[in-house]
Amino acid sequence: MAATPAREDLGTLVHRQADVSGARTFAEHARNDRVLTFEDLDRWRGAFTRSPFRPGTTVALMVSDPLQCAAAFIGGIASGLWVAPLDPATPETGPSGVGSLAARVGADAVISDRPAPDRAPCPWYELDSLAADLDPNSDGTGAPSAVSTAWIIRSTGKAGGVVLSSSGTTGRPKVVRLGQDKLLHTARGVVAHHRLSRDDRGFNPLPLFHINAEVVGLLSALVAGSSLVLDDRFHRTEFWRLMGERRITWINAVPAIISRLAELRAGERVPHGIRFVRSASAPLPVATADRFEEATGLPIVETYGMTEAASQIAAHPLSAPRRPGSVGVPVGIELRVVRAEGPGGDEPSECEAHEVGEIEIRGSAVIASYAGGEHGDRFRPEGWLRTGDLGRRDEDGYLYLVARTDDVINRGGEKVFPREIEEVLSADPAVISTAVLGRDDPELGQVPIAFVALRGLAPGDADGATRVVGRLNDALERSLVPARRPVALHVVASLPAGATGKVRRRALREPGIDVLHSFAGV
């Protein structure tokens, strides 16, 4: 991999890669023969530079086609815009509608591949019309036909970047603004740590409105000068055949995908040439990783990241054997595990090896505040961001995640970490996914309860559920002391999850959860 200038901005990077790679493929669609070349990216950058959008403008991007979304995302930011990617399935109205989300991220306009609603929340640009009017072969003076030129686009005068709203799986969503410098700092770290080169061909089925796909997928491929195959979503059918046909060398995945690939179907063969599978966005159960590696022969690189750090924080080294349960070592970032603050808010002290504490980070990719200045207590004067995650490090500095601070269960004064229970449950091959949370208890304060989704179980199969839960109770009794065992196990058809497969624990507390069978714990 050729070295890239550390302070090169995105516009310069796109232009340089177009000079170096020209008509080579940057991205291709997994379901057809359409491609996006490095020259195409530079045309999009130039088109946005000539557009009515002034540098510093915030635009919401809501595009379903992955190639068009990738082109507009990179072209927009490279021209100095703040791009806020939204789920293309976002409804037109309501509290989770386009208007509400556009207002939350501060968007001045929407770029979409669908027509504007009757009452557009702000100036609305249809992507096809915008792309046609911004044809790089034109003189660049035409105004997009989908909007009125009388609309004035505000400018913040910033260098541009991405605006994202956190998933909200653990609380109220937070709005994060990440400048080009932070995005590229993390992308360069991904390239170096995963040894990506122009010869690599990545596969990304993850949503492009999520920080992982944007940085680990799109921007790391751009930095490396490599190619990326984009899919609209994960398709299990003929997955390994597709990997072979597209000559994939690495896969960008999440635990939910790895779990579905951990068992090869009849006639399936894992193609040669795949170097590793990267796991991110949620904890990967050790048993799932073991099953996957045994079935496929491919190594898993487990990682840890968050939107506030432009994605990757830590990753397991490629050159070292996988340490079960570890998300690896920090990459291009400072990380510490600290004890609770002392009296009067004294500076917290760092934990010893294997001691559980709160994870804090700082560095070039880490934000200094949330948009609007909310949640200021998460930031320390010395630049440390309190992640809200609990973890521990071993003697070699490898990080192990334990729980979110909000998820720790206080059972009569004893702390119970959901993940230690989830690891036991996930070891059973019948378990697809599981989540443990605390339930209020009049005597103990809280007690753990578990939700499990089971493989191959018909909704009315009470006998089958009883057999599996019996095995689960036996495993819990062998592995955990009584105080750490769940008092109830609920079998559900599926666990509520976000776009990347991360379980929405708050939704499990809502009354609409469809529980198929309930059993008393051990």
Image (cartoon, grey):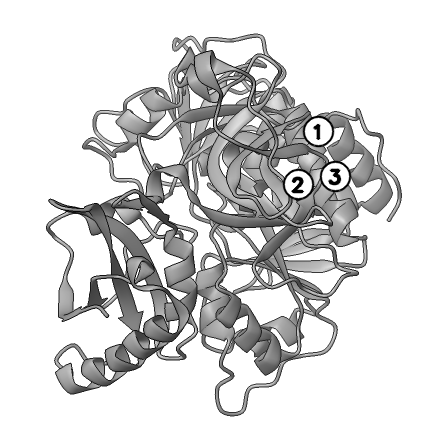
Residue at (71%, 32%) from the top-left corner? 185
In this figure, which residue is indicated by the disc labeled 1? 10
| Left or right of 420 in this view: 271 | right
- In the rendered image, residue 233, in percent from the top left (x then y), is placed at 45, 59
Q: For mark 3, give the secondary structure.
A: helix
Which circle marks residue 188 in the picture? 3
At label 1, which amino acid type do we have? Answer: Leu
- Real-space CA distance between mark 2 and mark 1, rounded to the nearest whole angstrom: 9 Å
Above-or-below relation of 514 to 61: below
Quarter holding the C terminus is bottom left
- Real-space CA distance between mark 2 and mark 3, rounded to the nearest whole angstrom: 9 Å
- In the rendered image, residue 411, in percent from the top left (x then y), is placed at 27, 48
At label 2, which amino acid type do we have? Answer: Leu
Q: Nearer the viewer, residue 300 or 15?
A: 300
Residues marked 2 and 1 touching at CB (< 8 Å): yes
Q: Residues within 10 Å of mark 3 (few under 14, many from 20)?
A: many
Above-or-below relation of 448 to 289: above
Q: For mark 1, give the secondary structure.
A: helix
Residue at (35%, 38%) from the top-left corner? 406
- Real-space CA distance between mark 1 and mark 3, rounded to the nearest whole angstrom: 12 Å
